[in-house]
Image (cartoon, rainbow, N blue to C red):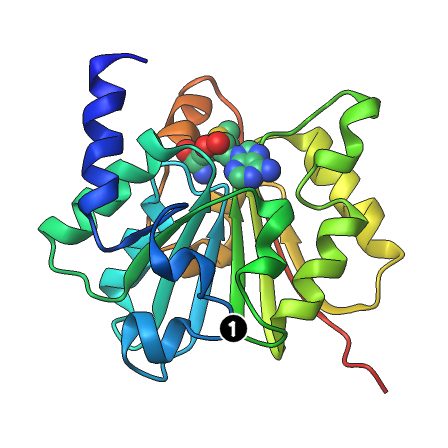
Amino acid sequence: MGRKKLVRFTDNALQHNVIEEGKPFFENCKGNWQAEHFGNTNPLVLELACGRGEYTVGLAAIYPEKNFIGVDIKGARIWKGSSIALEQGLTNVAFLRTYIQNLDHFFSPNEIQSIWIIHPDPRPRNKDAKRRLTHPRFLAMYKQLLSADGYVHLKTDNSGLFDYTLEVLQKQPIKNLTFTRDLYSSLLAAAHHGIKTKYEKAFEAKGFTINYLKFQFQEEI
Ligand SMILES: C[S@@+](CC[C@H](N)C(=O)[O-])C[C@H]1O[C@@H](n2cnc3c(N)ncnc32)[C@H](O)[C@@H]1O
């Protein structure tokens, strides 16, 4: 392991806003985020595949009345968002280092108010479809974890993943689907508050437009 990565992993172990294996709360967070980690009853917002956590930190600064949790498996990336949140004194930010497949080990049903999926890996090979974060198996888990009025937001530069997601959603019990294939020419951009991730900036510079959609799940009758 490189020295830089080692330093970041050592920091993560000490930074209280990073929840990862080996820390007591990692084993005990399900259903306890508000009371035990944040010490309030504010709604929980997740950023999945958060990388450096630009949405987690950016939205947390704008919405202090909500709690934001970035989820990613890569500790060295999470370190960046965690460190910026600490520098900015943002107490409504946490990062959970885990695989998104395991989200239901860390959150109770209805515990989450909304989910942002920001430039996830597109996984273009057919054999990897199950690993796409908008595959039906992930959607089933999001539905269980979200509160009744919760929104799922997807932002991606990848039109293949976007088309795939729209196709999947046609067969899902969802409502209030809104989408654009060019976010920055759309009124929907306002909800993003100008937040752009490092990954997004790189793709925009290559001329890609940014796709965005949001939807809610239908309530069970
Ligand atoms: C293309 S990068 C995008 C990162 C960031 N959202 C951005 O826009 O810069 C995808 C991120 O998803 C994370 N990731 C991919 N699959 C994952 C999974 N199953 N569980 C947790 N993290 C995952 C990777 O570690 C990586 O940081």
Quarter of the image with the C terminus is bottom right
Horizontal and vertical percent for residue 193?
A: 34, 55
Circle 1 packing at 10 Å, graded few (<14), some (14-19), many (20+), is many
At 21% across and 14% down in the image, what residue appears?
3
For residue 150, above or below residue 213: below
Residue shown at the point (42%, 56%) measured from the top left? 26
The residue carrying mark 1 is 113
Single out the residue that lies furthest toward the top.
2
In the rendered view, does 133 fall on the left or right side of 5? right
Residue 7 drawn above or below residue 21: above
Element under label 1? Answer: strand
**Vertical position of residue 136 compared to residue 37: above or below:** above
Residue 119 seen in render: no
Q: What is the x, y in percent for residue 195?
A: 34, 47
Q: Which residue reaches farthest bottom?
A: 221
Front-lying residue, 20 or 38: 20
Q: Nearer the viewer, residue 14 or 137?
A: 14
At x 42% / y 28%, what residue is drawn? 199
Q: Taking the image as drawn, is residue 36 in sight?
A: yes
* Quarter of the image where the N terminus is located: top left
Residue sitting nearer the eye, 211 or 115: 115
| Left or right: 45 as drawn, with respect to 115 | left
Q: Give above or below for 221 relative to 192.
A: below
| Quadrant in which residue 140 is drawn | bottom right
Q: Amino acid at mark 1?
A: Gln
Counting from the top left corner in percent of width and height, residue 70 is at 40, 51
Instruction: Report whether 111 appears left or right of 179.
Output: left
